[in-house]
Amino acid sequence: MVLSFFKEGSKLYTDAIDQIGRKEYSKAKKNLEAALKKGCDGKEKMAEMYIAFIEVGENRGDANRYAALNGKLANCGASNFKFGLTEIDTEALKTECELLIQEIKAAGMDDRNYMEKGQAYINVAMQFAMLGDAPLKFDEAFKGNTMSTASRESLILQAQAYEIMGKGVVAEDPKQGSEYMQMAYNFRRQVGDSGEDDLDLMNKYARSAKCWICGRPVNGEGIHFMAMRSTINPVFRTSTENDIIKPISDDCNSVYVCVPCYTAISNRSDDISRAYYDESIRQLRATERELRAEIESVRRIANMRN
Ligand SMILES: [Zn+2]
């Protein structure tokens, strides 16, 4: 009786391993849980580990799941195992879990502390770099992606680090921002991405202009100065031709305006529009009241005649 009970547990365990091979992870997880209840002939620790592995796949962004799996890997007693077609070295997967936990924590840091956050990304990136071309197993196991390696992950993290720092520092130092975006772009190119967004920001941060209104020179298009549509007659085009830093766009359809001038104009314009709007509503309500009174008096006269 007891023997058949164990046999049943072992069968559930074997079924679950087959289901993992077919990527039927939720079915496999249920069978492994059932196998654990019945006992599965010394495979209990492995069953627990497989459940934790599947749970990582259910939410790849949850650091707690990697930590839980790490505990189960340390206890499972196997130096290597298979997850579907993927051959896994237990120690290597523990390292991957630890680095992914650090990566998730870095991603959760506040963007306002951009230098600290960028540095946290670089720290993880350096640790991935030390693993060289070791394949990353979660991507292979869950996505069938065998191209994912530690060195590739390192490059992606470095690109992200410089993107975070570049977008953060541009508010204070557009030139530094542009340099960081260039580094991010170089890392993106190394992993085969176009990196065009980084390149675009690198150019915008580096672009300089002179404010048409206050005359201040300023760096960082879209951040510290804006192009405003304007009618620029030839007399103004020729008078700015020799300016090293241009106050008008190349197509001569816009003037450049620094953000303090730009926001002062748009805020004032908003205030004026708001005043017109409030006045129109006030007049509309007054007309409404007059009309209601008139309708009421017409009704009264009509009723008297009836
Ligand atoms: Zn200005």
Image (spheres, rainbow, N blue to C red):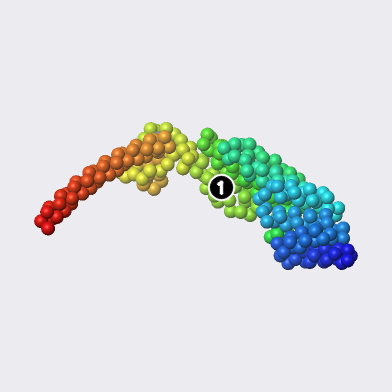
Residue drawn 55% across the image and 41% down it: 167
Location of residue 245 in the rendering, given as x and y in whole percent from the top left corner: 43, 37
Total marks shown come to 1
Q: Quadrant of residue 180?
A: top right
Q: Is residue 265 left or right of residue 152?
A: left
Q: Is residue 213 above or below residue 9?
A: above
Residue drawn 67% across the image and 53% down it: 60
Most foreground residue, 8 or 205: 8
Most foreground residue, 62 or 27: 27
Q: Is residue 255 left or right of residue 47?
A: left
Q: Is residue 168 above or below residue 30?
A: above
Location of residue 78 in the rendering, given as x and y in whole percent from the top left corner: 85, 54
Q: Is residue 186 above or below residue 83?
A: above
SS category of the residue bearing label 1: helix
10 Å crowding of disc 1: few (<14), some (14-19), many (20+): many
Q: Is mark 1 within 8 Å of ligand 1?
A: no
Residue drawn 79% across the image and 51% down it: 72
Q: Which residue is mark 1?
A: 198
- Res. 92 visible in picture: no
Most foreground residue, 76 or 288: 288
Residue drawn 57% across the image and 37% down it: 112
Q: Is residue 263 above or below residue 74?
A: above
Most foreground residue, 148 or 88: 88
Location of residue 66 in the rendering, given as x and y in whole percent from the top left corner: 72, 49
Q: Is residue 96 left or right of residue 1?
A: left
The amino acid marked with disc number 1 is Asp
Location of residue 253 in the rendering, given as x and y in whole percent from the top left corner: 36, 47
